[in-house]
Image (cartoon, grey):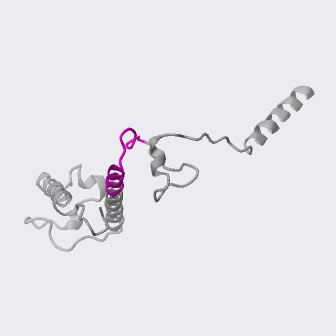
Amino acid sequence: TNTKMKSVIFAATIAAASAFAPAQVAKTTTSLNAFEDELGAQAPLGFFDPFGMLSGDCTQERFDRLRYVEIKHGRIAQLAFLGQVVTRAGIHLPGSINYAGDSFDSFPNGVAALFGPNSIPTAGLVQIISFIGILECAFMRDVPGTGNE
């Protein structure tokens, strides 16, 4: 048993030491190397395209468009998170949400505002989604020369 114990300790020591050995990094020769010098590409991953959206015929225009859309959606997600934090803190718009006199704070926070017994009426959800669609199509667009394209 003493020999077995020494063997186990030796194997564990070798395994632990191999964790600190430098890993071999393979050189990739794909078309994604064209974007290795773009802003955001950093070691150890370099240019990271997990869904392969730029594989195949990838042009600079397509890359710029995807980057613009990613930044826009990131900003929208940040605003959504901020909206959650603010309403969870109990800060609501003053006044009524409809002509029946329901106040903004009479509706629950989070997903309960969309589903459940005290949720926002369907007509209100349709208005919210329509407003977002109008913003997406009419206002949140590429404007050449302003730096957001």
Q: Quadrant of residue 108?
A: bottom left
* Residue 142 magenta-highlighted: no
In the picture as drawn, the residue positioned furthest to the left comes out as: 99
Vertical side of 22 occupied by 123: above or below: below
* Residue 62 magenta-highlighted: yes
Q: Residue at x 37, y 44 (%)?
A: 58
Q: Residue at x 29, y 52 (%)?
A: 111
**Nearest to the observer: residue 118 or residue 109:** 109
Left/right placement of residue 149 relative to residue 14 reads: left
Left/right placement of residue 116 relative to residue 43 reads: left
Residue 141 percent across, percent down from the top left: 22, 61
The quarter of the rendered structure image containing the C terminus is bottom left
Q: Residue at x 23, y 52 (%)?
A: 114
Residue 60 percent across, percent down from the top left: 36, 52
Q: Quadrant of residue 64?
A: bottom left
**Nearest to the observer: residue 76 or residue 95:** 76
Span of residues in magenta: 51-69
Vertical side of 56 occupied by 138: above or below: below
Residue 147 percent across, percent down from the top left: 32, 67
The quarter of the rendered structure image containing the N terminus is top right
Q: Residue at x 36, y 65 (%)?
A: 85
**Nearest to the observer: residue 17 or residue 138:** 138
Residue 76 percent across, percent down from the top left: 31, 60
